[in-house]
Image (spheres, grey):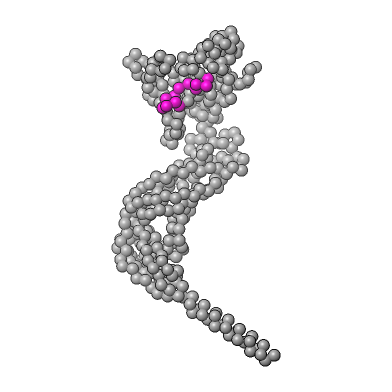
Amino acid sequence: MGSRQHIALGVVLLLGAGACGNLENAPLRVGTIEGQLTEFDPAVAVVSLVGAHDVRSSVDVEGRFKLEGVPTGPAELFVVATAEKATRVSVKVSGGQSVKLSRVAPRDAGFFEMRVKASHGERVAGVEVSVLDTPFERLVLDGAGRLRVGPLPDGCYGLSIAGVGFSGVQAEACVGSGEKKELRVELEPNAELVNRCGLTGCADGLMCGPGGNCVECLLDGQCGAGMVCKGFRCGAVGPRCGACDVNGSCAEGAACQLLAEGVATCVKQCTESMNDEDRVASRCEAGFTCQQGSCLPDPARFQGCRALLQLGAECADDTRCQKLGLPDGLCLEGQCTVSCTQDVECPGASRCEDSAVGQVCSLRH
């Protein structure tokens, strides 16, 4: 019995000794970093630890800073000195010791110019951007999806973009000293949302349409003068297949081209990408597609501009319409037309409507 008590007492003493050792060594696991900035704005300046930016310090009126509780080992400081200057400083910290840095000179900072939009036109105002492992957390985009992030020391960073109704995006980007780098990000709405725009709202110039989608228009009156709403998009009323003037000139945005069919025609110029400043500027009208930089009639329905102008021509049967250059031409109520699935496939003032032979581009006004 006495032997067992002796063993138990020995175990308690060993545990006690171990606990004391931990208490004594705890301060040795962290250290302190002190320094002074050569240039600073006390209202802006902050010095933090990369990877643990809750370990931070402001600066006093003389630019001095002090970080306490810094884990031992290699460390890097993230220094914001003024609204335009920043730097990074590498340092090694020993347990229980204070590291005194030589005077820290900040450099011209870089900035990320965020340009964020949603894939289906949803409003992104309020979406938050964070630069990982830095003090720049949960910065909010403005109504146009824009945000300047910085000042940032030159280097590479991970970014997180997140907002209600959208799938989060992780990205990486680098920026140099004095550089202003534009970053374009497209957000996808959460797939499970039924009424997407009812939750997020729509970007400026768009409105919430059927099925929870953001659209350009619901009625003609919501488009500009001389434009109509077709397929929830604003477009010009007339097709761009008109003849060139005697001096070979066309309306603004179109160029006179000699087409393969042998006629000189005013053809609108286009790009495959959307113009962020003007949604209609680079878009082809209904019934046209962008082909090598020019808006030309959809070849699946019209064999060139001459054929497109035959929409509505008199006919006795389908064959007559097809001979006029409409590959799937239909003769309906004595007029040539083509099949369709939506308004944007029908040129000019025609609309995609039901008929006895299915949906066709109707010429009725």
The answer to whether residue 83 of the structure is visible from this angle is no
Please name whichever residue, 126 or 358, is drawn nearer the observer in this view of the structure: 358
Residue at left offset 53%, top offset 24%: 345
- Whether residue 11 is situated above or below residue 335 in the rendered picture: below
- Whether residue 321 is situated above or below residue 7 in the rendered picture: above
- Whether residue 40 is situated above or below residue 230 in the rendered picture: below
Quadrant containing the N terminus in the rendered view: bottom right
Determine the image quadrant of residue 11: bottom right
Residue 104 percent coordinates (x, y): 32, 63
Instruction: Single out the residue that lies furthest toward the front.
Output: 3
- Whether residue 92 is situated above or below residue 173 in the rendered picture: below
- Taking 64 as reference, is 3 left or right? right
Residue 269 percent coordinates (x, y): 40, 26
Residue at left offset 42%, top offset 25%: 294
Please state the extent of the stretch shown in magenta in the rendering. Answer: 290-301
Instruction: Single out the residue that lies furthest toward the bottom.
Output: 2
Quadrant containing the C terminus in the rendered view: top right
Residue 230 percent coordinates (x, y): 53, 26
Total label count? 0
Please name whichever residue, 101 or 44, is drawn nearer the observer in this view of the structure: 101
Residue at left offset 46%, top offset 14%: 306
- Membership of 34 in magenta stretch: no
The answer to whether residue 98 of the structure is visible from this angle is yes
Determine the image quadrant of residue 254: top left
- Membership of 295 in magenta stretch: yes
Please name whichever residue, 45 or 100, is drawn nearer the observer in this view of the structure: 100
Residue at left offset 47%, top offset 49%: 171
